[in-house]
């Protein structure tokens, strides 16, 4: 392992640790908050976090071992199992991000009819489709022996098996399958993200314009208002306009930055005259893993509702550590108060 591979391995370790901890925090918030569990969007968030945790626990360590050892990390049966999970979890996480964008589109564009348009049954159907979609491609790759170790990506992933048939027909079938897989997973999810979030941005800008008109009319009527107050109102208008654009840019931009290099590389290597550089292959694979680390912050942990839950859980843990017998004493105090009430 040379210096470049060492840097990539260190980056992968950081990504794996951040992914595991952050997605576990999302699950912790889901368990401790009844309000989050009542939200339909929580189903998509939990499914995405579940996929990210499995990626951090299974696929990232196997890729790390492949980088360090410079060869296949496990035996063929275990490597095929890891490849199966890699294909399944990657497609599932892409479609989960698309499902979240559909939920936000319905919530923003149809706020009054959101409860009727996005029910628990509808959310479960979307998650079920994501699972069936990912599972069908993974099973097809397994049955066709297209799951193997790839030295270019130092990973057990979708790969034409070196031990299987290498005929022109087999390569053609593998090429068609790879094109279909990335088109039905990456391109479909990206199309949904762009359409839904651009609609959300359009509605958000429309509401911002209405708020700006009302604000300017109010400022015009309030002649005696201090200039500093007017400046703050105008600054808030500017921040309001930029907030929606910033969030949507993060959602779409992180998806493209993390997945597009890897998908383009996988499609480029199908050409017979193209040889992919190993360093670039590993780097593009690590970028796909970094999406698992950014998702919890983009969709959950930076929201005020999740921050409040984390603060509440942290306060409970601190009180439990500082006053380990407080629960027992409080119960005794409650029993004493109840006895005094009965005596009186």
Image (cartoon, grey):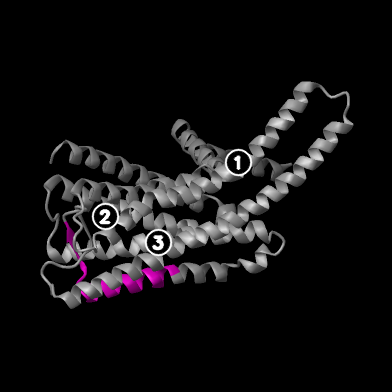
Q: Is residue 236 left or right of 187 when viewed as pictured?
A: right
Q: Does 131 appear in magenta?
A: yes
Looking at the rendering, the stretch of residues picked out in magenta corresponds to: 130-150
**Secondary structure of the magenta portion, mostly?**
helix
What is the C-alpha distance between the residues marked 1 and 3? Answer: 26 Å
Can see residue 260? yes
Q: Number of marks in the image? A: 3
Q: Could you tell me which secondary element the residue under label 1 belongs to?
A: helix
* 2 and 1 marks in contact (CB < 8 Å): no
What is the x, y in percent for residue 141? Answer: 26, 72
Q: Which residue is mark 2?
A: 59
The tag on residue 186 is: 3
Q: Could you tell me which secondary element the residue under label 3 belongs to?
A: helix
Q: Where 71 falls versus 297 (above or below)?
A: below
Identify the mark nearer the N-term, 2 or 1.
2
What is the C-alpha distance between the residues marked 2 and 1? Answer: 35 Å
Q: Is residue 54 left or right of 244 when viewed as pictured?
A: left
What is the x, y in percent for residue 119? Answer: 60, 67
What is the x, y in percent for residue 1? Answer: 12, 41
What is the C-alpha distance between the residues marked 2 and 3? Answer: 19 Å
Q: Which residue is mark 1?
A: 243
Q: Could you tell me which secondary element the residue under label 2 belongs to?
A: helix
């Amino acid at each position: 392992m040379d210096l470049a591979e060492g840097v990539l391995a260190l980056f992968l370790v950081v990504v794996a640790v951040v992914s595991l901890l952050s997605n576990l925090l999302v699950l912790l918030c889901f368990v401790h908050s009844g309000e989050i569990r009542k939200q339909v969007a929580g189903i998509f968030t939990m499914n995405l976090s579940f996929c990210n945790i499995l990626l951090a626990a299974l696929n990232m360590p196997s890729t790390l071992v492949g980088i360090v050892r410079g060869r296949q990390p496990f035996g063929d049966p275990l490597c095929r199992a890891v490849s199966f999970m890699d294909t399944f979890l990657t497609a599932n996480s892409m479609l989960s991000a698309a499902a979240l964008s559909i939920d936000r589109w319905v919530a923003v564009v149809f706020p009054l009819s959101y409860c009727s348009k996005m029910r628990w049954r509808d959310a479960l159907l979307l998650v079920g489709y994501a699972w069936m979609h990912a599972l069908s491609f993974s099973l097809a790759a397994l049955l066709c022996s297209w799951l193997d170790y790839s030295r270019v990506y130092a990973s057990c992933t979708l790969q034409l098996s070196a031990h299987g048939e290498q005929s022109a027909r087999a390569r053609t079938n593998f090429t068609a399958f790879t094109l279909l897989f990335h088109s039905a997973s990456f391109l479909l999810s990206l199309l949904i993200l762009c359409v839904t979030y651009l609609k959300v941005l359009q509605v958000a800008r429309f509401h911002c314009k209405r708020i700006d008109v009302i604000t300017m009319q109010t400022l015009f009527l309030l002649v005696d208002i201090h200039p500093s107050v007017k400046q703050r109102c105008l600054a808030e208008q500017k921040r309001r306009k930029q907030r929606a654009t910033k969030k949507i840019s993060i959602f779409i931009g992180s998806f493209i930055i993390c997945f597009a290099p890897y998908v383009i590389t996988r499609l480029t290597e199908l050409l017979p005259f193209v040889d992919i550089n190993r360093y670039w292959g590993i780097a593009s694979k690590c970028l796909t893993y970094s999406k698992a680390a950014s998702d919890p912050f983009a969709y959950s942990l930076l929201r005020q509702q999740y921050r409040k839950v984390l603060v509440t859980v942290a306060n409970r843990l601190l009180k439990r550590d500082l006053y380990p017998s407080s629960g027992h004493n409080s119960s005794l105090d409650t029993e004493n108060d109840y006895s005094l009430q009965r005596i009186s």
